[in-house]
Image (cartoon, helix red, strand yellow):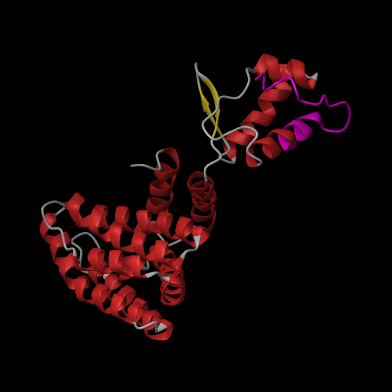
């Protein structure tokens, strides 16, 4: 199918804005699928009845907002992916607001608290069985194994909440948290092993509360877990209690989040 063939020509007003709005609508509506290549600039220009420079302006804005990935020498590709869109949004917020680590941990705690409350109400027997299995797992063979185990538990918790939007936000924030913890720990396996053991019992207790269908107790356990988590981060070799709240960490956070935007799979 010729993607440029059905494009309406623009004739008045600020044409770059009209092109931007039309391409954005087609991307978010699924007409231009995630990962697909945009029509060539000359084809878009001909279809819209505008110059190549006008098309480039619209595509630059799409790229800046994370909807298009411009690959020099290859073309422009659609990036209509929820994780990528949220990563782009949060990267901008972190940079503009000079967000500190404590702020991010607070938001993650709020999301995990809500996830626990929803899971207490919505989790199926299969969800709870998977969650208990993940809670009891404390892999210690490598730093990657420990991080993978932590991710598995919370990914399973979010799935049990049956809230896709919550999952998307929480996943991104947890990736940031774990990335920062890895940086502050210097990648030392013994510190990660210790942290995993320190938090294991609390994960099991949370599953017990979910199985008892007790959202209030589950929320309290999440608060306790996050307070313990902050103390674990405080004890890492390259940080201190005061540094966790230091706004100077905002620069590091911004660079880390930007890297996540460029490569969400890292």
Q: Quadrant where the N terminus lies?
A: top right
Q: Position of residue 99 (x, y in %)?
A: 47, 60
**Is 10 covered by the magenta stretch?**
yes
Question: In what quadrant of the picture does the C terminus appear?
Answer: top left
Q: Which image quadrant for residue 109?
A: bottom left
Residue 23 placement (x, y as % from top left): 69, 33
Image point (37%, 68%), residue name:
245
Dominant secondary structure (helix, strand or loop) of the stretch shown in magenta: loop
Q: Magenta residues?
A: 1-21
Does the magenta run of residues contain 43? Answer: no
- Is 18 situated left or right of 119 in this image? right
Q: Nearer the viewer, residue 15 or 170?
A: 170
Report x, y in % for residue 249.
37, 58
Q: Position of residue 142 (x, y in %)?
A: 13, 51
* Residue in the image at 14% along x and 54% along y: 188
**In this rendering, is residue 230 above or below 139?**
below
> For this view, does 143 lie left or right of residue 99?
left
In the displayed structure, does residue 243 sit left or right of residue 258?
Answer: left
Task: Name the residue located 42 percent from the left edge and 49 percent from the top edge.
Answer: 257
Residue at the extreme right of the image, as rendered: 12
């Amino acid at each position: 199918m010729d993607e440029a063939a059905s494009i309406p020509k623009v004739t008045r007003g600020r044409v770059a804005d009209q092109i931007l709005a039309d391409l954005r609508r087609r991307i978010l509506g699924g007409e231009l699928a995630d990962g697909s290549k945009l029509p060539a600039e000359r084809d878009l220009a001909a279809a819209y009845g505008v110059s190549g420079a006008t098309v480039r302006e619209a595509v630059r804005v799409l790229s800046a907002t994370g909807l298009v990935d411009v690959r020099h020498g290859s073309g422009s590709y659609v990036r209509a992916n929820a994780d990528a869109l949220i990563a782009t949004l949060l990267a901008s917020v972190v940079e503009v607001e000079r967000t500190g680590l404590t702020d991010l941990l607070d938001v993650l705690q709020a999301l995990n608290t809500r996830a626990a409350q929803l899971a207490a109400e919505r989790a199926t027997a299969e969800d709870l069985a998977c969650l208990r299995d993940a809670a009891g797992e404390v892999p210690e063979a490598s730093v990657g194994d420990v991080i993978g185990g932590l991710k598995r538990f919370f990914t399973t918790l979010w799935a049990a909440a049956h809230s896709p939007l919550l999952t998307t936000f929480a996943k991104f924030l947890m990736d940031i948290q774990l990335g920062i913890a890895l940086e502050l720990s210097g990648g030392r396996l013994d510190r990660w092993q210790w942290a995993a053991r320190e938090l294991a019992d609390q994960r099991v207790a949370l599953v017990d509360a979910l199985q008892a269908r007790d959202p209030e107790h589950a929320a309290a356990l999440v608060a306790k877990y996050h307070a313990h988590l902050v103390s674990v981060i405080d004890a890492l070799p390259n940080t201190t209690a005061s540094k966790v709240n230091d706004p100077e960490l905002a620069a590091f956070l911004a660079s880390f989040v930007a890297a996540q935007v460029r490569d969400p799979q890292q």
